[in-house]
Amino acid sequence: MTAVQAVRQTEQRGTPTDGAAGPAARPLWQVALGVMFNPGSVVEAAAGKSPVGALAISGAAFALFFFQTGLDVARQTGAGIGAAGVLAAIGAAYGTLGMAVIALMAWALCLPFKSGHSPMWAVRAFGVAYSPALLYALLGLPFNLLLGWNTALSFGVTGVLWAFSPTMSTLKSMTNGSLGASALYATITGGLLLFGWSFLGTGR
Amino acid sequence: MTASTNAGLSPREVEEFKHGAATPLQALCFALLGGLIARHVMPDPAVVAGGMVAGVVFQAVGLGYLTWLLWVFNPAVRHEYGFRGVSVAVAHGFMLLFPFTILALLAEMVLGWQAVQAFCSAGIMAGTATTGAEIAKLGGGRIRSMAIPALWGMVMTTAWMLGWGIAAPMIKALLQ
């Protein structure tokens, strides 16, 4: 049974919203590392779980990423930490609502491929795909807070770039394995997220 | 065709790995990335063209050696799909460089970021990781399929960054 079939079975059982992974539940750090090194299988398995949990991953990743952007800007301009807090809230909204909108847009773009994935599956898979971004943002935070490094580009953008790999695996599954289409859609969705951060986070 | 090696692959995918051809897309991506970095060294058309050629040579050597390594260390895949199957898997994996290249171009040209190396290193590592997943899908050993590309990805990334770090002052000294 392939991973896609496993996810479909999970959906048919009507359990995608309970967030319980059953006896094979794995801690978040294992999911995050798995997403980095074997993105396809992990994303597809995890996408069978809760959309809230999946969007919490991308929401936390972007909240921390935007927070570090705010801290970098505050260090240069002398603005207070309050502005960084506001940016973190914008990042949280961007990583949850924005991510859901982009995932639904990708799902709509992939409709002609008739993969059979539901819109909720797409939202869950996109959310989980940003596990590497969360991991990088968490790693960057102590360097920013304790050592005063500017980490938005070095850790934040790098984390979002690392998330392209699982995103592409997700899109490959949503396009029935079409590499060309998934590369193109990964460019569009990744570009929207990255340049959206540039606009909202840095005003450029 | 053995059941174990082709588990999870559709007949179309098996056909593609056995008889498909690697696309020149990854060569184009490395050429563009090389050109972008060379533009930072010196915004001269000849230097940019040289950077693009260096990118193509780097991908030919780097991905050629990765293909050879995976072919040597995965006898099951070698027996089933041959060198062509492994090279198609590498080409599939490095399709992932396309989004990184386009976004690096946009980030440089439109937003004025100076972060091409971040896009390059993340793109190379993501490409090698996806290649590993493709080889595992073909029936390669799980550890070997993931570890060899990951380690080689680190070598390629280091060589790419160090190479440009060493070449940049030499080019400047030669041409100024």
Image (cartoon, helix red, strand yellow):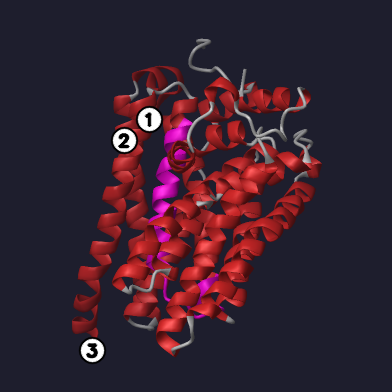
Q: Main secondary structure of the magenta part?
A: helix
| Side of B42 where A200 appears, left or right | right
How packed mark 3 is, by other alpha carbons closer than 10 Å (few <14, some 14-19, many 20 or more), is few
Residue A72 visible, this angle: yes
At x 58%, y 47%, the residue is A167
Give the residues in magenta. Answer: B106-134
How packed mark 2 is, by other alpha carbons closer than 10 Å (few <14, some 14-19, many 20 or more), is some
User: At which x and y percent is residue A145?
Assistant: 36, 69
CA gap, disc 3 and disc 1: 46 Å
User: At which x and y percent is residue B23?
Assistant: 52, 45
The quarter in which the C terminus of chain B is drawn is: bottom left
* Disc 1: which residue: B145
At x 68%, y 23%, the residue is A5
The answer to whether the residues at label 3 and label 1 have Cβ atoms under 8 Å apart is: no
| Tag 1: amino acid | Ser
User: At which x and y percent is residue A76?
Assistant: 41, 86
The answer to whether the residues at label 1 and label 2 have Cβ atoms under 8 Å apart is: yes
Depicted A85 relative to depicted A157: above or below: below
The quadrant in which residue A171 appears is top right
CA gap, disc 3 and disc 2: 41 Å
| Tag 3: amino acid | Gln
Depicted A82 relative to depicted A26: above or below: below
Label 2: state its secondary structure: helix
* Disc 2: which residue: B148
